[in-house]
Image: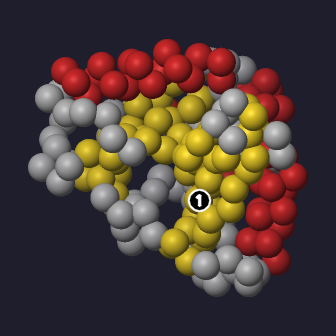
């Protein structure tokens, strides 16, 4: 079953006053289609896949979304994708126009796998995702990462959940 609604964040999930508490069961081994949603894109600089200006970019874009009153009150999603060892693109969910940003769409079906741990384990997680898809008869294609919390909130929640979303073909089933 393909899910077309991004999970709702409840008011009680905002424990830290920053990032909402993440519920992995809403994402683990689910297939999502974000075609009905609008995003805006920004990027960060990296050095061998390590972000250099993540905090500044995230803070600026979130402020731009808030100032434009273009954020969802009950949903939150930023999809990130390394396009090289020196650049990462980020797609922010919005429900309106944000001055200075061109609207973007993310089309297709994405199989989700949730991981928990330090970001240094990303290569292990990618290998695992590749193996999971291979066992389902599919090859790993385009992948997005959903970093569910900032580092401070990950410490507060005692979890650093990361959702990897792998594009799958239209006839992919669980």
Picture residue at 82% right of the left edge, 40% below the top: 52
Looking at the picture, does residue 43 appear above or below residue 104? above
Q: Is residue 94 above or below residue 167?
A: below
The way the protein has been coloured in the rendering is secondary structure
32 left or right, relative to 74:
left
Quadrant for the C terminus in the image: top left
Quadrant of the rendered structure where residue 127 is?
A: top left
Q: Residue at x 33, y 41 (%)?
A: 141
Position of residue 3 measured from the top left corner of the image (x, y, whole percent) = 31, 54
- Count of numbered labels shown in the rendering: 1
Most foreground residue, 130 or 153: 130
Image vertical order of residue 105 relative to residue 1, above or below: below
Give the answer, above or below, for where 46 lies relative to 10: above
Judge from the rendering whether residue 9 lies leftward or rightward of residue 43; answer left or right. Answer: left
Residue count near mark 1 (Cα–Cα under 10 Å), binned few <14, some 14–19, many ≥20: many
Q: Position of residue 109 (x, y in %)?
A: 29, 53
Q: Position of residue 114 (x, y in %)?
A: 47, 29
Q: Which quadrant of the figure has residue 129? A: top left
- Rendered residue at 46%/57% (across/down): 6
Q: What is the secondary structure assignment of the residue under circle 1?
A: strand
- Taking depth in this image into account, of 97 and 28 the one nearest to the observer is 97
Location of mark 1 (residue): 91
Q: Position of residue 87 (x, y in %)?
A: 67, 47
Depth order, front residue of 93/19: 93
Say which residue appears at 77% left-offset and 64% top-offset. 61
Q: Is residue 171 left or right of residue 24?
A: left
């Amino acid at each position: 079953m393909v899910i077309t609604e991004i999970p709702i964040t409840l008011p009680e999930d905002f424990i830290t006053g920053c990032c909402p508490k993440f519920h992995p069961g809403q994402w683990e081994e689910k297939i999502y289609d974000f075609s009905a949603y609008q995003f805006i894109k920004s990027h960060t600089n990296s050095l061998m896949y390590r972000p250099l200006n993540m905090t500044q970019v995230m803070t600026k874009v979130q402020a731009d979304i808030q100032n434009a009153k273009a954020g969802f009150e009950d949903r939150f999603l930023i999809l990130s994708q390394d396009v090289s060892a020196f650049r990462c693109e980020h797609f922010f969910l919005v429900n309106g126009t944000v001055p200075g940003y061109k609207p973007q769409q993310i089309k297709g079906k994405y199989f989700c796998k949730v991981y928990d741990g330090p970001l240094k384990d990303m290569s292990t997680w990618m290998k695992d995702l590749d193996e999971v898809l291979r066992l389902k008869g599919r090859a790993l294609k385009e992948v997005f990462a959903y970093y569910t919390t900032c580092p401070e909130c990950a410490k507060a929640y005692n979890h650093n959940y990361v959702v990897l979303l792998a594009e799958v073909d239209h006839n992919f089933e669980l």
